[in-house]
Image (spheres, rainbow, N blue to C red):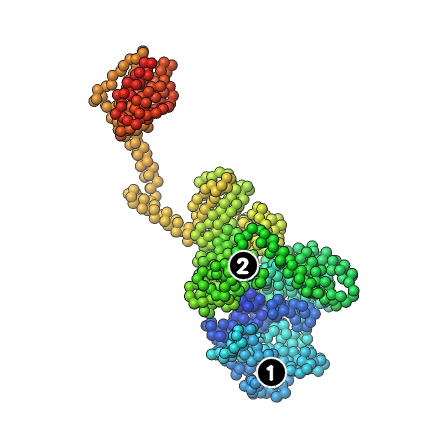
Amino acid sequence: MPSLNEIRSTFLNFFEKNGHRIVDSSPLVPRNDPTLMFTNSGMVQFKNCFTGLEKRDYVRATTAQKCVRAGGKHNDLDNVGYTARHHTFFEMLGNFSFGDYFKEGAIPFAWELLTKEFDIPKDKLLVTVYHNDDEAADLWKKVAGLSDDRIIRIATNDNFWQMGPTGPCGPCTEIFFDHGDKIAGGPPGSPDEDGDRFIEIWNNVFMQNEQFEDGSMRALDMQSIDTGMGLERIGALLQGKHDNYDTDLMRNLMEASAHATSSEIDGPGNVHHRVIADHLRSTSFLIADGVMPSSDGRGYVLRRIMRRAMRHAHLLGAKDPVMHRLVPALVREMGAAYPELGQAQALIEETLRLEETRFKTTLDRGLKLLDDELSGLPDDAALPGEVAFKLYDTYGFPLDLTQDALREKGREVATDGFDTAMAEQKAKARASWAGSGEAADATVWFDIAEKNGVTEFLGYDTEAAEGQILALVVDGAIAPKADGKVSIVVNQTPFYAESGGQVGDQGVIETETGSARITDTKKVAGVFIHIAELTSGEITKGQAARLIVDHTRRSAIRANHSATHLLHEALRRALGDHVAQKGSLNADDRLRFDFSHSKGLTANEITRVEAEVNDFIRQNTSVETRIMTPDDARGLGAQALFGEKYGDEVRVVSMGRLAGSNKGADKATYSLELCGGTHVKRTGDIGAFVAIGDSASSAGVRRFEALTGQAALDYLNAQNARLIETAAVLKTAPSDVADRVRALAEERKALANEVAQLRRELAMGGGAAGAPEIKEINGVKFLAQVVSGVTGKDLPALVDSLKEKIGSGAVLVVADTGGKAAVAAGVTADMTDKVSAVDIVKAAATALGGKGGGGRADMAQAGGADASKAAEAIAAAEAAIGA
Ligand code: SER
């Protein structure tokens, strides 16, 4: 009996043998189709290959595609667990031809695989074809030898497959297996076709048309093939089972669930194990593909599935979280075919454990409330919508979880009341937001958010994606098409909107009819606003658009943001635990980090911080992201912004490993921070880190500025070029520049001293103008001299030398400083009780047309307006001494 893993391989190998390229499954979040919540069939990744928009280097492909059907149009969540063939997660096996073979190739391949490789008895198979598809009917007759009664013509959409309201489509042929008359049910197209006797196992679509939004359809230039076979179904069939959950893989997961909950796999808990096994697969694969539980969009679908599984674990009597303990079993079963599962195992386990731990605290109380409410109602009455809303709002019960709980009791929720309560809550949120003082023109974004929901951000793991244009805003008002400067809102985007210090992304947005340059991205009320300028053609609301982030710029921003985390930790280690983030900027050209610290950093501290950051860059370890509650994150020691309000869940980014640490994983992590930004994959991607400044930002806050990657290299190169130029000017080698400059500085200082000395000597006349005569006034010796070619600054030295010359007495120097005058007086210490230099200088300054004068009794200085009055100044000084 082949296992599901073997059946998958047999399928892929068969088509590979027949010239097909085995292509990896695409992620569950479709990057190329904004209209889809999750990838729900094999052709999603190839949709543009059918219309000719995209060319690959192969024309035949085969895949095992991960698919999720929950939320959105194809929603199987409600039935999962209770039926034989419903799943939220399943694998679709497919073979594809892009303009290569058509019906004449597909039908023989299908027949050969089923009857030869899988060895299914021919007489158990029958097919349907679209009512007017004679070609397919004839081929079946010829290739498989099927009689007319086993080729059933169907005129409905069942045999005309469409990807969605628009896109490639065409007639299809479906292959059915007949379980025999021991099971009730009729062949396809018959009144009792819904019975379980005839099971569809494979759909082969003949892609030949494209459907447009206006209802028109065109014939495609090339004819292609898209087939889809659910692995679980064919697996059940080949393993002789009627129920997909009885296949080896599903059974092994259910065993793990039974083991973890110490319950019987086939007892009354069977349905719970089925739910758990299915939901374990969808939640784990979604997390591995980057979806995180949240209160909106894809994240909310994930949360709904997780919580539904958790309630079933609870019904099995599990006291502690269960789901995360089943992940190893899933990785064992499916990790070889889908390596992303193993790679994300830690993230999956932690996300499940967190969600379950948190939900457990309200699950009991919510279920009790539900029971109390039900016991107060007549037996068959629906649960009032307000109660379901309270369960949602206060206890975290998604509506379908409440419905699932009621299903066992044969009861329903009055959903109208739920919707009304939800609408009221939204109106309240809006009112309180409007009152929060935000700009009035921002209401347009709130309107958009309310109508379309928040924007889904895909930019953690992709820089290009398709989105659908939901709104265009020109001059603050909704507009039908873009014009000049325009703000564009799409349902999903890879563009990061400015927040947490990280600048918004730039790039381009293109539709079939036009393109625009995105110059910035911002976020209001959860709506991402792409601020753009139309560059060609026109862009209209409703169009599908391709959004491409400027890769070089984003890479530089990422490097700066990750470097900021390393810097934060390095500063804490170098300066102390008081270092807390006060602000930051992560732009493409630089990073800035403001932190609490009261004094400037020493050169040593800067060097140490810089070296440590570079050590962790070179360590080149991977940067990990996890989701947890703010409390758990703080418990792990993650750095959070003090006073910042965090939601229920936070992203925790960790990087760097401490050498030789034998502590747990989180204790051995160098940097652990709450952060919603985008980061490098490995620290080595930062390239290099160079500090360019430490300055005071505000009281008690320092600002550290740095460069990374190419910008750091450019900076160092420019510094180096300047050094080389300086060395050339100095006529020395770059390595000797410092010594050379030091020597020059010393030389300059000596020369300056010499010049000052010479100037003084020159000023004193060097004896040439005759030594000034010493007078004696009132018993005080007085010597006055008029000088020029000096400044006021030189006067004290001149006064000192005159004082020395007379030994005891008073001196006066009047300097001609180019028309104006400077004057200084000095009195030797033994004479200061007789006369004060201040009085002398004041008298002289007045005579020179100046005012004031200040200093001490032994030395005072002043200025004057007119140097030609030197003689009058000397006379005034003499008078002052004589007074
Ligand atoms: N696209 C078709 C389906 O989903 C065949 O793969 O059924």
SS under mark 2: helix
Q: Nearer the viewer, residue 820 or 240?
A: 820
Which quarter of the figure is the N terminus placed in?
Answer: bottom right
Q: Nearer the viewer, residue 134 or 685?
A: 134
Q: How many marks?
A: 2
SS under mark 1: loop
Tell me which residue sits at (62%, 48%) in the image.
635
Tell me which residue sits at (39%, 49%) in the image.
715
Which quarter of the figure is the C terminus placed in?
Answer: top left
| Residue 494 shows in the view | no
Give the mark nearest the N terminus, 2 or 1. Answer: 1
Q: Nearer the viewer, residue 454 or 240?
A: 454
**Relative image position of residue 819 (x, y in whole percent):** 27, 29
Residue type, numbered disc 2: Val
Q: Is residue 491 left or right of residue 386?
A: left
Residue identifier under label 2: 444
Confirm or deny contact between disc 2 and disc 1 (CB under 8 A). Answer: no
**Relative image position of residue 24 (x, y in whole percent):** 53, 69
Image-quadrant location for residue 625: bottom right
| Residue 86 shows in the view | yes
Residue type, numbered disc 1: Ala
Residue identifier under label 1: 155
Q: Is residue 763 left or right of residue 503?
A: left
Q: Is mark 1 within 8 Å of ligand 1?
A: no
**Relative image position of residue 774 (x, y in whole percent):** 27, 15
Query: Is residue 302 shown above or below 834?
Result: below
Q: Is residue 330 left or right of residue 483?
A: right
